[in-house]
Amino acid sequence: MAIVSFVEEGLGNSSYLVELGDGRALVVDPPRDVSAHREAAEGRGLRIAYAIETHLHADFVSGSRELAAAGSTIVGARAARLEFPHRGLDGGEEIDLGGLTLRAVATPGHTPEHLAYVLLDGDRPLALFSGGALLPGSVARTDLTGAEQTESLARALYRALRDGILSLPDDLPVYPTHGGGSFCSLDASGERTTTIGRERASNPLLAAPGEDAFVERLLATFGSYPTYFRRLRDVNRRGPRVYGGLPTLEPLGLDEVDRLLADGAELVDVRPLDAFAAAHVPRSLSIALRSAFASWLGWLVPDDRPLVFVLDAGQGRRDLVRQCLLVGYERLAGELAGGIEAWRDAGRPLASTSVIRMPDAARGPIVDVRQASEYRAGHVPDAAPVELGSLAGGAAGLIPAGATIMCGHGERAMSAASLAERDGIPSAVFVGGPDRWSRRTGTPLVTG
């Protein structure tokens, strides 16, 4: 048996290709683009026989139906009520894998229908695929299905861990889906895998003296999360569209872009922040193409609008399309042909944004658009906390005119500045974040 990990850095998630020893393989929690999983399987001479789902994902669109289109059997929780062909399991049920066995373990908590899976060779456990039930240093949050279920799911998770997961051997490897950087668990460590014994010894939540303390500690870790989380569970329950491969991004002439924008399309500029700052189409939204692109697209842009993109020549169109589909953005109208140069050459108006690299050049109030947990960990004195996600409905009343906006590096601050510009609010972006500010000024950051 071999287990190959695939990490979606921007979402903080992992999926797994598991070799079963008989020319077949299974994949656990595949993302929408399964090309890497297929290539890995083909390179090992394997056929992907099963696509295993631990829960209805809120943070990404599942790729199980893409694998099923090529002959894989989808396995998921019976309680998920999937609306497409699959094999439903309840906790305690098993699948004979021809020498190995996959046993479902009921682990409600992160979601009501959540299953973890133990892979066994006879009676000997080989691996636990924990989804969001147990993570390195944490567990996944229980508030994504609604505030009314948050505490009851946290209590269910405590009991599932106590009675099910922690009864497994200490040396059993644990392969979670969520990890560090995931909005499904803000306090997970940077480790991608762990063992039962390591978590028993070091996980602060598992060290809670009882159920009430566990619930109190867990609920204290929750912060905000992208708004697209509210709809993807239903997308995954109904069954996402099957593409069979990534579509291409079509080039669009100026007249077509004008027509789309007049009809309500969103113009998203994915160029690096310095390029956007120097010249951009007025009212365009800056979301630099990087590993975190999908999360911020899903937080800041409604999913019911056609999307038009502005890119530099060397940027990866395939990665852009992959990240859009990963979080359920299907209406990809295309990209501005010729990029910003075509817009400039046609004599169209351009806007620019001030970029500041030295603290003494900053003017006006300072606004920090990082997550609240980041702000509490250390911020510039007198900086006002305004999470970037809170600006999706507009910057008026949140970003004061003439503000200097900062984040950890500059990309989120530029997104905030572009949203402020739409509301007629001038601002500047500080590049480098609070750490750079502190080093340059010699001023300690404020915590809390």
Image (spheres, helix red, strand yellow):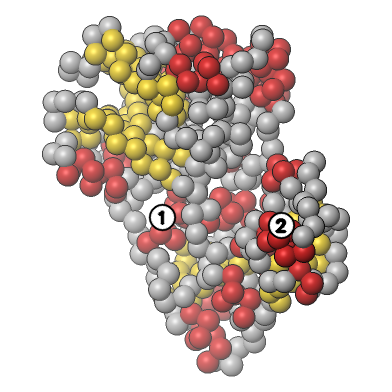
Task: Say which residue appears at 68% left-offset and 33% top-offset.
Answer: 222
Looking at the picture, tell me which residue is in the foreground, 284 or 177: 177
Task: Say which residue appears at 68% left-offset and 18% top-offset.
Answer: 215
Question: With respect to residue 49, does 119 lie above or below?
Answer: above
Secondary structure of the residue carrying tag 2 is helix
Q: Left or right? Give the position of 395 relative to 141.
A: right
Task: Say which residue appears at 57% left-offset and 60% top-offset.
Answer: 305
Q: Left or right? Give the position of 379 relative to 130.
A: right
Decide: few, some or many residues near mark 2? Use Cα within 10 Å; few <14, some 14-19, many ≥20: many
Question: With respect to residue 13, does 406 lie above or below?
Answer: below
* Quarter that holds the N terminus: top left
Q: What is the x, y in percent for residue 233?
A: 52, 35
| Residue at numbered disc 1 | 322
Looking at the picture, tell me which residue is in the foreground, 213 or 256: 213
Question: With respect to residue 406, does 207 lie above or below?
Answer: above
Question: With respect to residue 132, does 96 lie above or below?
Answer: above
Looking at the picture, tell me which residue is in the foreground, 432 or 350: 432
Secondary structure of the residue carrying tag 1 is helix
| Residue at numbered disc 2 | 434
Q: Left or right? Give the position of 20 relative to 393.
A: left
* Quarter that holds the C terminus: top right
As drawn, the residue found furthest toward the front would be 442
Depth check, mark 2 against mark 1: the one in front is 2
